[in-house]
C-alpha cells in the first residue's frame, strides 16, 4: 500500500471516530480541532497530510518543527507541544503559532519579549502527576497564581489548559479532573476556556470531557517514525 493511501485511510478513520464521539457527547464538531502530531515523521508525511486537507500540525522538537514549517505552505498552523527550554524560545516563536506547554512565568516573559514572533495562542500545561517533574507542567495548586502573574507581568493571554493523562490512571478520571480545574479557573480567567486533551489512545474520552484540541499522531501516521 502506498504511503498516501495508508495515511488517507487512517486519517479518515480518526475523523469518523471524532465525529461519532462528538455526537455521543452532544457537542458541536466545529468546537474540536484535530492537531496531527508529526514528530519523528518525515516532512513528506506532513505534505501528504496537507494534500488530504490537514492544516494543523504538532511538533515536540524545535529543530524539527522549524525545518518542516519552511517546507509547507503558509496557511498551516504549527503547534509546539514539547517541554519548553529557555534557549529555544526565540526559535520556537519564529515558526510556531501556538504553544501547548507553557508552565512558567520566566518562559512567559521570554515569549512575550520575542520581537519577531508568530505566536498567537498559549495553553498552560497542568501536571497531573505531581511526583513526576519530568512530565512538565504546573501543579493544579499553583495554576491560578501562575495565571495571575502572567496576566500582570506580560501581554500573554492563555486560551486554555493542556494536560497529558497519566498512564496508570483511567483517562476518564484524569480528564474529569481537568474539567474541574478548568471550571475553577474560569471564575477568575474566563478567557482560559480551551482544553488541549487527548491523544491516539484516549481522544474519545477527551472529547467527552470537553476537549477543544486533540493531539493525535500514531493513529494517523502509524509507528514508523524517524529515530528519536
Image: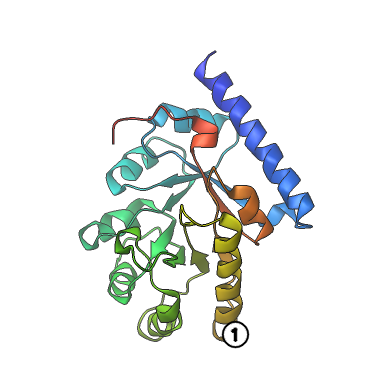
- Residue 141, horizontal then vertical, whole percent: 43, 80
Q: What's the image's color scheme?
A: rainbow
x 39%, y 31%: residue: 43
Where 101 sits versus 184, above or below?
above
Is 127 situated left or right of 51 in this image?
A: left
Where 56 sits versus 88, above or below?
above
Q: How many labels does the image show?
A: 1
- Residue 129, horizontal then vertical, whole percent: 41, 64
Find disc 1 in the rendering and name its residue: 187
The quadrant holding residue 197 is bottom right
Where 222 sits versus 75, above or below?
above
In which quadrant will I find the N terminus? top right
Is 34 situated left or right of 77 in this image?
A: right
Residue 48 visible, this orientation: yes
Residue 32 visible, this orientation: no
x 32%, y 55%: residue: 92
At label 1, counting other C-alpha atoms closer than 10 Å, the crowd grade (few under 14, some 14-19, many 20 or more) is few
Residue furthest to the top in view is 1
Tell which of 59 and 20 is nearer to you. 20
In which quadrant will I find the C terminus? top left
- Residue 79, horizontal then vertical, whole percent: 44, 52
Classify mark 1: helix, strand or loop.
Answer: helix
Is 58 situated left or right of 113 in this image?
A: right
Residue furthest to the left in view is 87
x 34%, y 62%: residue: 136
x 72%, y 48%: residue: 21
The quadrant holding residue 94 is bottom left
Tell which of 181 and 191 is nearer to you. 181
The quadrant holding residue 142 is bottom left
Is 55 situated left or right of 125 in this image?
A: right
Amino acid at each position: 500500500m502506498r504511503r498516501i493511501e495508508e495515511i488517507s485511510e487512517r486519517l479518515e478513520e480518526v475523523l469518523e471516530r471524532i465525529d461519532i464521539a462528538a455526537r455521543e457527547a452532544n457537542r458541536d464538531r466545529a468546537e474540536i480541532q484535530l492537531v496531527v502530531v508529526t514528530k519523528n515523521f518525515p516532512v513528506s508525511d506532513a505534505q501528504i497530510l496537507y494534500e488530504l486537507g490537514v492544516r494543523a500540525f504538532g511538533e515536540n522538537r524545535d529543530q524539527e518543527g522549524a525545518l518542516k514549517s519552511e517546507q509547507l505552505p503558509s496557511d498551516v498552523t504549527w503547534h509546539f507541544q514539547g517541554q519548553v527550554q529557555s534557549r529555544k524560545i526565540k526559535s520556537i516563536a519564529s515558526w510556531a503559532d501556538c504553544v501547548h506547554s507553557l508552565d512558567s512565568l520566566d518562559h512567559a516573559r521570554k515569549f512575550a519579549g520575542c520581537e519577531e514572533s508568530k505566536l498567537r495562542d498559549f495553553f498552560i500545561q497542568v501536571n497531573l502527576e505531581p511526583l513526576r517533574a519530568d512530565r512538565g507542567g504546573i501543579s493544579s495548586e499553583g495554576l491560578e497564581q501562575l495565571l495571575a502573574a502572567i496576566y500582570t507581568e506580560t501581554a500573554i493571554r492563555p486560551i486554555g489548559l493542556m494536560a497529558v493523562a497519566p498512564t496508570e490512571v483511567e483517562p476518564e478520571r484524569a480528564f474529569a479532573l481537568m474539567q474541574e480545574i478548568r471550571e475553577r479557573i474560569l471564575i477568575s480567567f474566563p478567557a482560559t476556556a480551551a482544553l488541549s486533551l487527548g491523544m491516539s489512545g484516549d481522544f474519545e474520552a477527551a472529547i467527552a470531557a470537553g476537549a477543544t484540541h486533540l493531539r493525535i499522531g500514531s493513529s494517523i501516521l502509524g509507528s514508523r517514525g524517524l529515530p528519536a
